[in-house]
Amino acid sequence: MAGCCSHSTCDAGAASPRFRQALWIALGVNAAMFVVEFVAGLAVGSVALWA
């Protein structure tokens, strides 16, 4: 349980290239969905965009 203490350091090491690639893919998907939702909201005149 030594790893649960707040004063211990956490050394996760460098992230593997596959993990980093998965994070970039997830970021890209989220960014694309943001753009799609924003453009669709503008196209239909959504009032929620002004909130």
Image (cartoon, rainbow, N blue to C red):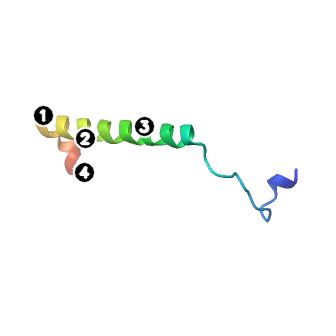
Q: Name the residue under label 4.
A: 51
Front of the two marks 2 and 4: 2
Q: Which circle's residue, 2 or 3, is located before the other in the chain?
A: 3
Q: Which circle's residue, 1 or 4, is located before the other in the chain?
A: 1
Residue 45: % across, % down: 12, 39
Instruction: Name the residue furthest front.
Output: 17
Q: In terms of image quadrants, where is residue 9?
A: bottom right
Q: How far apart are marks 1 and 3 (CA)?
A: 29 Å
Q: Which circle's residue, 2 or 1, is located before the other in the chain?
A: 2
Q: Name the residue under label 3.
A: 25
Q: Mark 2 points at which residue?
A: 35
Residue 12: % across, % down: 70, 51
Residue type at mark 4?
Ala
Residue shown at the point (55%, 37%) measured from the top left = 18
Q: CB atoms at circles 2 and 1 under 8 Å apart? A: no
Q: Mark 1 points at which residue?
A: 44
Residue type at mark 3?
Ile
Residue 28: % across, % down: 37, 40
Front of the two marks 2 and 3: 3
Front of the two marks 1 and 4: 1
Q: Distance between the residues labelled 2 and 3?
A: 15 Å
Q: Distance between the residues labelled 4 and 3?
A: 29 Å
Instruction: Name the residue furthest bottom.
Output: 7
